[in-house]
Image (tube, rainbow, N blue to C red):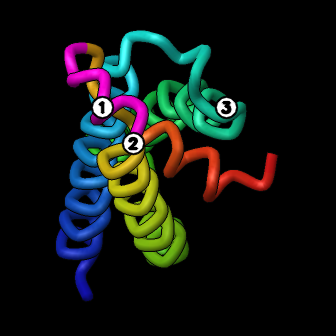
Amino acid sequence: MSGIGEASLVLGLISSTIAIFEAAQEIYEAAGDAAGLPKRFRVAAEQIPLVHNALGLAEHNINGQNVTEKALQSAKPVLERCKENAARVKDIFDHTIPTKNAPKAERLKKAVGIKLKSPR
């Protein structure tokens, strides 16, 4: 694959991963009260801005053509896994974190589901 094609592919992976993490962050922030969530959820949510920033820097460097084709090729599998993990985080947040305005029954149902799945 050409350098331009490889860069486009990697930029696409970065952009989609950033979008997924932004959606996960929105879900987490919509919950309003992080105190009722398991510690692992809070830790994961606290790391989203760091990952978002790192991906943004990578995107900036690729757009500025400051990355070799070899670096792009080696980044591709890492970014594919990152995208998969981002999708898993978003899916978990989406299915287990109730929104701030959710009815009390829904908040309790999701809270019980979280506690049952959490090892702590």
Image quarter for residue 103?
Answer: top left
Q: Of all residues shown, which one is farthest toward the bottom?
A: 1
Q: Which mark is residue 43?
A: 3
Left or right of 99 in this view: 33: right
- Residues at marks 1 and 2, CA–CA distance in whole angstroms: 6 Å
Q: Does residue 105 show up magenta in the picture? A: yes
- Asked if marks 1 and 2 touch (Cβ < 8 Å), the reply is yes
Q: Residue at x 23, y 43 (%)?
A: 19
Left or right of 104 in this view: 80: right
Disc 3 on helix, strand or loop? helix
Q: Position of residue 57 (x, y in %)?
A: 44, 33
Q: Amino acid at mark 1?
A: Ala
Disc 2 on helix, strand or loop? helix
Q: Which mark is residue 109?
A: 2
Please state which of the two labelled residues, at mark 2 or mark 3, is closer to the viewer.
Answer: 2
Q: Is residue 99 above or below residue 3?
A: above
Left or right of 25 in this view: 43: right
The range drawn in magenta is 101-109
Depth check: give the residue in front, 18 or 7: 18
Q: Which of disc 3 and disc 1 is earlier in sequence?
A: 3
Depth check: give the residue in front, 46 or 105: 105
Q: Position of residue 59 (x, y in %)?
A: 34, 42
- Answer yes or no: is residue 114 visible: yes
Q: Quadrant of the C terminus?
A: top right
Name the residue beneath numbered marker 1.
Answer: 105
